[in-house]
Image (cartoon, helix red, strand yellow):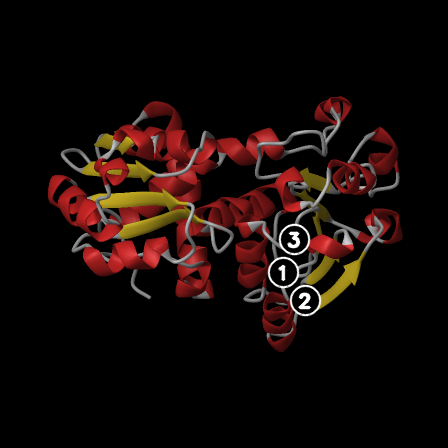
């Protein structure tokens, strides 16, 4: 799609050419992310976060400020008219009259699509339930390109909660656009990757397999992408603790990995990555989070037609 003036609801809205364009502009934005720019001077981003967020919300705000624009919005739906019963489409119509572009996070799957239908300005999905998180995927792809020098041909392990994790859903879909990629899905039985995502990747020529034990595949990986095992998804405390012990990354696990493997995580982490791993040069999750600013700067500038 042409990014100028369009919505970004799903990573599937983007072709490989679109993704390559975002990644190229993101590289050009690294300097502006440090030094600032006037590219979007006079433009306003409405950051509408109906669900808690740290990195996504702050990086969107930082991105707009670094572009010379301004940001308005909220980080708690409880302080908005939604608490009085206002429907989402009404909130979006009003916010679109106050701003030039909207980033929305919402706990309900499909909420971003509803927002796009109600808005006459571009909508960016900043996460909708367990569905999609396309801007996280773009910064994940940028991290792969920066840290590994390529995306084609990589062997990537997706680890942890693959059933409800919207970041891994979006990433698996995006990787289907690249050639020679191998995906290893590593999770407990209760949290396996949804079949439709596995089928989609397979149909696109991605080699994708499922595993219950990280030790089976760790030595094969160029990239390990961890996600949090979500306690709230289990029927009992015991069931959760029985599973989580086998899905934690520590120095011992890292010792089985390639010397040049990278460890990624969308954050927040709870206890699935031991703090000792932070000192391993292969751990790039904080660098990954920092890339969120230039990537979101690139996306905003492209969607507002400020770069070609």
Vertical order, 296 against 128 (above or below): above
For disc 1, the marked residue is 152
| Mark 2 Cα-neighbour bin, 10 Å: few <14, some 14–19, many ≥20 | some
For disc 3, the marked residue is 162
Closer to the chain start, of discs 3 and 2, is: 3
Q: Which mark is residue 180?
A: 2
Q: Quadrant of the N terminus?
A: bottom left
Say which of 267 and 24 sits in front.
267
Q: Secondary structure at mark 2?
A: loop
Residue 11 found in image quarter? bottom left
Gap in angstroms between the C-alphas marked 1 and 2: 6 Å
Gap in angstroms between the C-alphas marked 3 and 1: 22 Å
Q: Position of residue 18 (x, y in %)?
A: 40, 60
**Residue at figure coordinates x 33%, y 44% from the top left:** 104
Name the residue at the left extreme. Answer: 97
Whether the residues at callouts 1 and 2 have beta carbons within 8 Å, the answer is: yes
**Residue at figure coordinates x 29%, y 63% from the top left:** 2
Q: Position of residue 94 (x, y in %)?
A: 14, 44
Q: Position of residue 267 (x, y in %)?
A: 58, 34
Q: Position of residue 146 (x, y in %)?
A: 57, 42
Q: In the drawing, does residue 303 fall left or right of residue 166?
A: left
């Amino acid at each position: 799609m042409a990014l100028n003036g369009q919505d970004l609801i799903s990573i599937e809205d983007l072709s490989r050419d679109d993704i390559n364009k975002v990644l190229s502009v993101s590289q050009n934005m690294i300097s502006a992310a440090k030094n600032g720019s006037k590219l979007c001077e006079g433009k306003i981003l409405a950051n509408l976060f109906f669900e808690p967020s740290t990195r996504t919300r702050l990086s969107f705000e930082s991105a707009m400020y670094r572009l010379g624009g301004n940001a308005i919005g909220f980080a708690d739906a409880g302080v908005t008219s939604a608490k009085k019963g206002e429907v989402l489409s009404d909130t979006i119509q009003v916010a679109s009259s106050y701003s030039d572009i909207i980033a929305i996070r919402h706990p309900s799957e499909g909420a971003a699509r509803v927002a796009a239908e109600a808005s006459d300005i571009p909508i960016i999905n900043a996460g909708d339930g367990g569905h999609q998180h396309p801007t996280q995927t773009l910064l994940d792809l940028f991290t792969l390109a920066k840290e590994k020098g390529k995306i084609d041909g990589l062997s990537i392990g997706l680890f942890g909660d693959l059933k409800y994790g919207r970041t891994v859903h979006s990433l698996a879909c995006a990787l289907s656009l690249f050639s020679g990629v191998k995906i290893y899905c590593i999770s407990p039985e209760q949290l396996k990757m949804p079949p439709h995502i596995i089928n989609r990747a397979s149909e696109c020529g991605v080699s994708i397999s499922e595993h219950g034990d990280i030790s089976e595949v760790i030595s094969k990986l160029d990239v390990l992408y961890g996600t949090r095992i979500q306690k709230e998804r289990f029927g009992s405390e015991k069931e959760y603790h029985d599973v989580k012990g086998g899905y934690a990354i520590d120095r011992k696990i890292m010792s089985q990995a390639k010397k040049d493997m990278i460890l990624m995580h969308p954050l927040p982490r709870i206890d699935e990555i031991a703090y000792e791993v932070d000192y391993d040069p292969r751990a790039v999750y904080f660098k990954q989070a920092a890339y969120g600013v230039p990537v979101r700067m690139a996306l905003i500038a492209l969607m507002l037609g400020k770069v070609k």
